[in-house]
Amino acid sequence: MKDEALFKKNITVLCELFDKPLSQLLTSVYWKALEPFTDGQCERAFKEIILSSKFFPKPADFIERLTGKQEDQATQAWICVVEAIRRYGNYQSVGFANPVIHSVIEFMGGWGATGEWQDSELKWKQKEFERLYNIMQQSEKHPEYLPGLCEIENGTRGYDVNTAIVRIGSIGKRQIAA
């Protein structure tokens, strides 16, 4: 959140609704927690929490409201992967907006290996992906992209590897690849 006046208005309303004293410490903790998100996202989260919460929300309640539950994030990431496999295949190098996906796919054999997955085994691959996603989400280092089979083959044969990377996913409301 960037608009401090909007934040102060919303946190004041929240504190008044729940009879919570508004302190500088409380304000700064919530401000820091909401800092990575857009004003629009935070405004919606405040409205949803005001309409649905019975108790004064913790910062974690806001984060969960803004990012979704951890299980939902893993499932959304899996859906993105399956759509990318079907749309682009494993020959094209890809870069997901969510870099955690890169780490998970690398651990599962790499982007090239996704072409070997059979439809009958996708439900098991999904379980493995979601379990690994929840673990890998804790890491701060992830590959920048996933090389496709064309890039891998060209690299091993000594050809110049200057591959175009298809960007997949969205950041906020902005779509990266159509």
Image (spheres, rainbow, N blue to C red):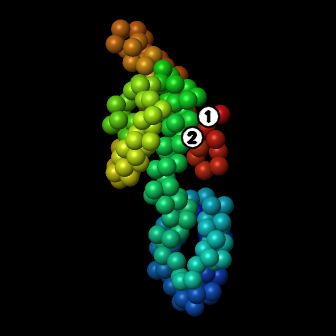
Q: Which amino acid does label 1 sit on?
A: Ala
Q: Which residue lies furthest to the front in this view?
A: 120
User: Does dot 1 land on a helix, a strand or a loop?
Assistant: loop
Dot 2: within a 10 Å radius of its alpha carbon, few (fewer than 14), some, or many (20 or more) residues? some
Of the pair 117 and 74, the residue shown nearer to us = 117
User: Does dot 2 land on a helix, a strand or a loop?
Assistant: loop
For image coordinates 34% across by 31% down, the residue present is: 109
Quadrant of the rendering where the C terminus is positioned: top right
Q: Is residue 87 above or below residue 171?
A: above
Report if the CB atoms under discs 1 and 2 are less than 8 Å apart: yes
Q: Which amino acid does label 2 sit on?
A: Gly
Task: Answer yes or no: is residue 172 visible.
Answer: yes
Dot 1: within a 10 Å radius of its alpha carbon, few (fewer than 14), some, or many (20 or more) residues? few
Residue at label 1? 177
How far apart are labels 1 and 2 at the CA level?
A: 6 Å
**Horizontally, is 119 left or right of 158 in the view?**
right
Which label was assigned to residue 169?
Answer: 2
Total label count? 2
Q: In this view, does 7 lie above or below 154?
A: below
Q: Position of residue 52 (x, y in %)?
A: 62, 76
For image coordinates 50% across by 64% down, the residue present is: 64
Task: Answer yes or no: is residue 129 visible.
Answer: no
**Horizontally, is 83 left or right of 104 in the view?**
right
Q: Where is residue 171 in the image (x, y as percent from the top left)?
A: 58, 46
Which label was assigned to residue 3?
Answer: none
Q: Earlier in the sequence, mark 1 or mark 2?
A: 2
For image coordinates 41% across by 25% down, the residue present is: 116
**Horizontally, is 102 left or right of 83 in the view?**
left
Q: Position of residue 95 (x, y in %)?
A: 49, 33
